[in-house]
Image: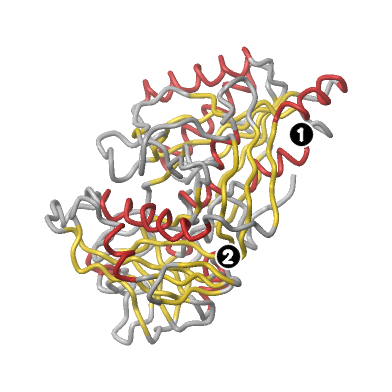
Amino acid sequence: MNVGRTKKLRIGNFNVKDIVFGEKTSFYNGVLTVNKEEAIACLDPNKELKNIQIHIVRPGDSTRILPCKVAVEPRFRPDGRSTFPGLTGPLASCGDGSLYAMKGISVISCGKYAQSSDGMLDMSGPGAGHSFFAKMVNLIVYAELTNPTNIDQPFRNEAPLKLAAHFLADYVAKSLAGQEPENWECYELEPGAAEAESKGLPRILYYSQMRGQVGRDKFFNDQIFGIDVENMLPVLVHPNAVFDGQVASFGGLYGDGFYTYAYQNQPVLKRLYQEHGKTINFLGVVFWACDSADKVKQTAKVTSGELGSMLRADGAIVHSTAGGSNYDIDFFYHLAELEDRGIKTVGFTAEHNGKAMLDPKGDAIVTGGESGTIFEFPPMDFVIGDIQSVVRDFYHAAWTVHEKYGPSLRPDGSLIVNGCMIVDSTNNCAFTTKSVKDF
């Protein structure tokens, strides 16, 4: 492992055609076989869960999963390092060496109770057309907390359930050991940087929000090396490390938000890498924690600006991880700060029925989708999770009663909700058909 100045990350991809249950967890000829008993035993090391179930869902199934909490791509480190250092294993450097990835599948956790930013995944019907995950085979882990607290609150500690998806993804990915990937992706900044410098190409930074809501640590916010980012000052991160498990998300799997799978496969970073040395000089990633007190927002924007100035950035992409209220304020604060420093910006954010704050300095905005549209979804034959959570618990995208539409959950199991309810439907990761995929 290279722990010096340069980093070179090689991701070996294995395309998974199907998942089945069997006696031995293995991967052969495109099929992942999972020993259900072993899988359940590995995903709850501290015995904090009960009623644990594992399901396989495929595109076209008449299946609805909710409330969805986190999604993870199974990955494996041949050198023995943890896939998520500091979170699921010992701390180690990220972004260098070889990493194996299972493509075409994900591991998703869901539970009985919802909190605000949880979402819904339909594997068929009109809802499936809005979600990237409806196009792949998914391994779903359902569980309940052994000792739940604050059940009636919109935010509660569900870290064991969200960790379960990360542990399960690690477990199944180990079946790749000793096999040869179908193809490789390679990420390395230094060669492109040398070429970009010789050409005098514009120096570009990528800024991305992270959930860092005060007082919700260990069960809602994003994590860096397993540490909650609440009140974190902006930090410069190598883009390879983002792909390689340094960043994980404990936020809900709703339409607007980022999630661990998105960080592992961040398409905006991949696009910046494609242009590195050709049209731009890609400098790296700056993460900052949003949804904080205004003093922290002000401190974060100035610190972000200082990083941009010190790195002599000419331009920046500023990426909102969600949208509305505090997220919008943080977003426009950063756009204005960078513009004031002479760093030209492009903002990337979801659309809503109204933004909490606008600034004329943010005059180049790319949309990732619109989350306020009302949709009606027919009932499904099978529900994983608890459909009663739609009217019992607090979702951003559903309601117990509405003067025009009535309750979101109807007696026949059909739903009326807004687009933010659908997993991956309106976020800025550029996976969905409504997202902008090119710049």
71 relative to 188, above or below: below
Left or right of 25: which side holds 155?
left
Q: Are marks 1 and 2 in contact (CB under 8 Å)?
A: no
* Crowd band around label 2 with a 10 angstrom C-alpha radius: few (<14), some (14–19), many (20+): some
Which quadrant of the structure image shows residue 310? top right
Pair 1/2: label in front? 2
**Residue 327 location in percent, x, y?**
45, 39
Q: Residue at x 69, y 33 (%)?
A: 188
Q: Give how far apart the Cα atoms at labels 1 and 2 are.
A: 27 Å
Mark 1: which amino acid? His
Q: Which residue bears the numbered disc 2?
A: 104
Q: Secondary structure at mark 2?
A: loop
Within 10 Å of the Cα at label 1, are there few (<14), some (14-19), or many (20+) other Cα atoms? Answer: many
Q: Earlier in the sequence, mark 1 or mark 2?
A: 2
For the N terminus, give its image quadrant: top right
Which residue is labeled 1 in the image? Answer: 276
In this view, the residue in front, 278 or 354, is: 278
Tell me if residue 258 comes above or below residue 407 in the rendering: above
Element assignment for label 1: loop
Quadrant in the picture for the C terminus = top right
Tell which of 393 and 99 is nearer to you. Answer: 99
- Kindly identify the amino acid type of the residue bearing the numbered disc 2: Gly
Residue appearing at x 32%, y 87% in the figure: 412
Q: Which mark is residue 256?
A: none
Q: Is residue 324 left or right of residue 141?
A: right
Residue 131 higher or lower than 226, as above or below: below
